Amino acid sequence: MMEQSLKKLFDYQKFEGNSALQSVIDSVHSRYSVRELDLDELEYVNAAGISNMYLLKKEQESKEDGNR
């Protein structure tokens, strides 16, 4: 509900040009800017299941334990 209201306000602002509303929009955009994650940040992303980094780490640990 709130997201739809904000979307309508943002669309309205494109045509109206209200300076107070533009200030709010700029504030929201600065807090929630969209950007690409770098490789270090991608290590912490896991949409579902077990991450590849976790599996690689476990595989390396088991190899190290086997070499002892």
Image (cartoon, helix red, strand yellow):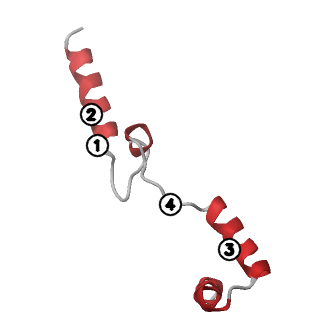
Q: Secondary structure at mark 4?
A: loop
Query: Which residue does the numbered mark 4 point to in the structure image?
Result: 34
Q: Residues within 10 Å of mark 1 (few under 14, many from 20)?
A: few
Say what amino acid the circle numbered 4 marks: Val
Sequence-first tag of 3 and 2: 3
Say what amino acid the circle numbered 3 marks: Ile
Q: Secondary structure at mark 1?
A: helix
The image shows residue 8 at horizontal and vertical percentages of 60, 90
Quadrant in which the C terminus appears: top left
Sequence-first tag of 4 and 1: 4
Res 5 label: none
Query: Which residue does the numbered mark 1 point to in the structure image?
Result: 52
Query: Nearer the observer, disc 3 or disc 4?
Result: 3
Q: Residues within 10 Å of mark 3 (few under 14, many from 20)?
A: some
Q: Which residue is rendered at x = 35% and y = 59% of the image?
A: 48
The image shows residue 63 at horizontal and vertical percentages of 21, 20
Q: Which residue is rendered at x = 58% and y = 88% of the image?
A: 11
The alpha-carbon separation of the residues under discs 3 and 1 comes to 38 Å
Residue extending furthest top?
68
Query: Which residue does the numbered mark 2 point to in the structure image?
Result: 56
Query: Nearer the observer, disc 3 or disc 1?
Result: 3
Q: Secondary structure at mark 2?
A: helix
Image vertical order of residue 16 relative to residue 44, above or below: below
Say what amino acid the circle numbered 2 marks: Leu
Res 25 label: 3
